[in-house]
Amino acid sequence: MAGQKEIYTPVLDEYLADFELVRSDLEGKMILDAGAGRRMFAKEGLELGIGGIVSLGDSRNWWLDVLGMMETLRRVRPESEDLRRWETVGRNSVEGFLFELPFAANSFDLILCRDTLIPRIFIEPTRMTEAYRELVRVLMPGGRAIVLPVWFDNWDNDEKWCAGEALAALVEMRGIRLEVRESVRMVAGMEAVGLTADLYKS
């Protein structure tokens, strides 16, 4: 529409590209961003009227930076719409771990897990199976979880073995359909071939 301000959502658009989704896939759903970092996906979602995004993360410096920015906004622009959005994001933010999710069973229609189930960096390899079981537990019947990546060709043999064991445990779970597809990501400036998993709960 002429004169309508275009909403700039680079992080949300990157999520959509990585997970091979479109904006309509997010509408009207309860969504868990599992490993949310600065919570920009949830914030940009609010700018588009997508309000059902819950951010799971920890209290690392990137979120503390956002909290500091919010305090500055409260002082200088207390009526800022941007501040209102960040306050909503804050209310919908939860600290926790993928292997012990602080949510009731059957809580989410869609779970997006990007670059958080990486052995030794974000999770101990032996806890990967627990993390997958938790994702399945909080997923609603008829829901979908997308995990990117579940395997990378630059992981060492132990990491690949743990990832394979975790995926094998998923295959054995009743009511879960697992689809795995190839994905190519940039890692340290180089292309790396990995796998993305789609989990469907009946």
Image (cartoon, grey):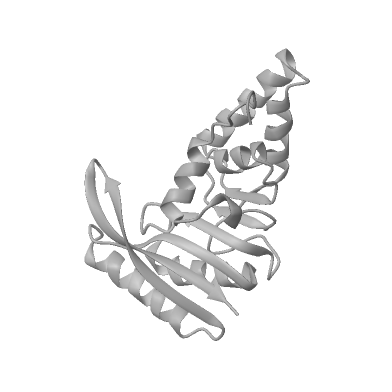
Front residue (pair 159, 45): 45
**Left or right of 188 in this view: 77:** right
Numbered-mark total: 0
Q: Quadrant of residue 196?
A: bottom left
Nearer to me, 20 or 30:
20
In this rendering, position of residue 193 left or right of residue 121 = left
Q: Residue furthest front?
A: 2
Q: Is residue 47 above or below residue 183?
A: above
Residue at 52% in and 53% down = 22
Residue 115 in sight: no
The answer to whether residue 111 is above or below residue 16 is: below
Seen from this angle, which residue lies furthest top? 76
Judge whether 119 appears above or below 84 on screen: below
Q: Is residue 98 above or below residue 166?
A: above
Q: Is residue 195 visible?
A: yes
Q: Quadrant of the N terminus?
A: top right
Residue pictured at 29% horizontal, 72% vertical: 161
**Image location of residue 156, percent across then percent down:** 23, 62
Q: Can you give x and y, in whole percent of width and height, for residue 175 in the image?
A: 57, 83
Quarter of the C terminus within the rendering: bottom right
Q: Position of residue 50 (x, y in %)?
A: 67, 46
**Dividing the picture into quarters, in which one does residue 126 lie?**
bottom left
* Identity of the residue drawn at 67% across and 33% down: 86
Q: What x and y, as percent, mark residue 115?
A: 41, 52
